[in-house]
Image (tube, rainbow, N blue to C red):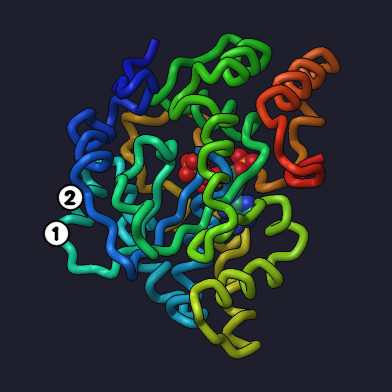
Amino acid sequence: MSDYTWFEGIPFPAFGVPKETLQNVCNKFVVKEEDLILLTYPKSGTNWLVEIVCLIQTKGDPKWTQSLPIWDRSPWIETDIGYDILIKKKGPWLMTSHLPMHLFSKSLFSSKAKVIYLIRDVLVSGYYFWGNSILAKKPDSLGTYVEWFLKGNVLYGSWFEHIRAWLTMRELDNFLLLYYEDMKKDTMGTVKKICDFLGKKLEPDELDLVLKYSSFQVMKENNMSNYSLMEKELILPGFTLMRKGTTGDWKNHFTVAQAEAFDKVFQEKMAGFPPGMFLWE
Ligand code: PPS
């Protein structure tokens, strides 16, 4: 079994996410008004979002995305390396986080810092990603992973609780909710939505460049974005960030019983949200 960093009853990767950093993020870190925070539960399409935001900032010029690792462009606040980069750097900050809401810096909730929260049906992606790294306990089958996932016994805790909590901010002006499934269907529409939210005006040819350089194929070949620079001792054969990049992959993997078990927990946990709130099939 992999070791974890346990914090407030939630397991985090033992490598790179120490308790002290989690405590600092939660209690000490002060978000600035001009910051932009990209928030996701793991495997929601975080890196795709980071790539798009970076390319919007450069108006489609890929020099930045092709010369600096993605985790240095938008540091992960809960990692020791990311936290260190952020506290040493003068703002405004672009940062990424998978943290559940109750463990994020309290300063966010009284600030006008912008937050983009991206959600996705993540289970199958997580099964392959964590299973091919040494960061998480390896399940003996997808069935076992489904059981762990439904109980929230996985890295970063319950996906359901993560979404429920962060979506309490969804009516705020400084909060943009995105869906991976929507991004796939209408990438240009999503990029324009992000531009509007950030107050960025890009020309049509610049928008085309954003799309081009954040495409699955280009990101897969970009060593600064495809995690090929990840420490080799953390990964197992078969590890990849850019696995398939599709929606609805559960249909290729779940048994009928697993799909029913998932639906049942989903209905219970997400009761209270308006119908049509979640876009996955
Ligand atoms: S992580 O490790 O939690 O930060 O992973 P995350 O980036 O959130 O999610 C990885 C999944 O996102 C897919 N991805 C993309 N899909 C479409 N287009 C682009 N450009 C893109 N970039 C990353 C990636 O393939 C992972 O999904 P799966 O289903 O595993 O392929």
Q: Residues within 10 Å of mark 2 (few under 14, many from 20)?
A: some
> Going by the image, does 266 lie left or right of 127?
right
Is residue 226 positioned above or below 26 on the image? below
Q: Exactly how many numbered labels are in the figure?
A: 2
Q: How packed is label 1: few (under 14 Cα within 10 Å), some, or many (20 or more)? A: few
Foreground pick, 100 / 208: 100
Q: Which quadrant of the view contains residue 140? A: top right
Q: Is residue 149 above or below residue 41?
A: above
Along the viewing direction, whichever of 266 and 3 lies nearer the viewer: 266
User: Distance between the Cα atoms at labels 2 and 1?
Assistant: 6 Å
Could you tell me the amino acid type at mark 1?
Answer: Lys
Instruction: Farthest residue to the left: give it.
Output: 88
Residue at the right extreme? 256
Q: 173 or 157, which is in the foreground?
A: 173
Q: Position of residue 156 (x, y in %)?
A: 44, 29
Check contact, mark 2 vs mark 1: CB within 8 A.
yes
| In the image, the residue with mark 2 has its CB under 8 Å from the nearest atom of ligand 1 | no
x, y (%) of residue 192?
63, 75
Asked if residue 236 lies left or right of residue 183, the reply is left
At a point 71% along the width and 22% down the height, the residue shown is 268
Q: Give the x, y percent position of residue 101.
A: 43, 40
**What quarter of the picture does the N terminus occupy?**
top left
Determine which residue is flagged by label 1: 88
* Tag shown at residue 84: 2
Look at 73% across and 21% down and name the residue there.
Answer: 262
The residue at the point 53 percent across, 20 percent down is: 152
Q: Position of residue 155 (x, y in %)?
A: 45, 26
Q: Amino acid at mark 2?
A: Asp
Q: Secondary structure at mark 1?
A: helix
Question: Does any portion of residue 221 appear in the rendered image?
Answer: no
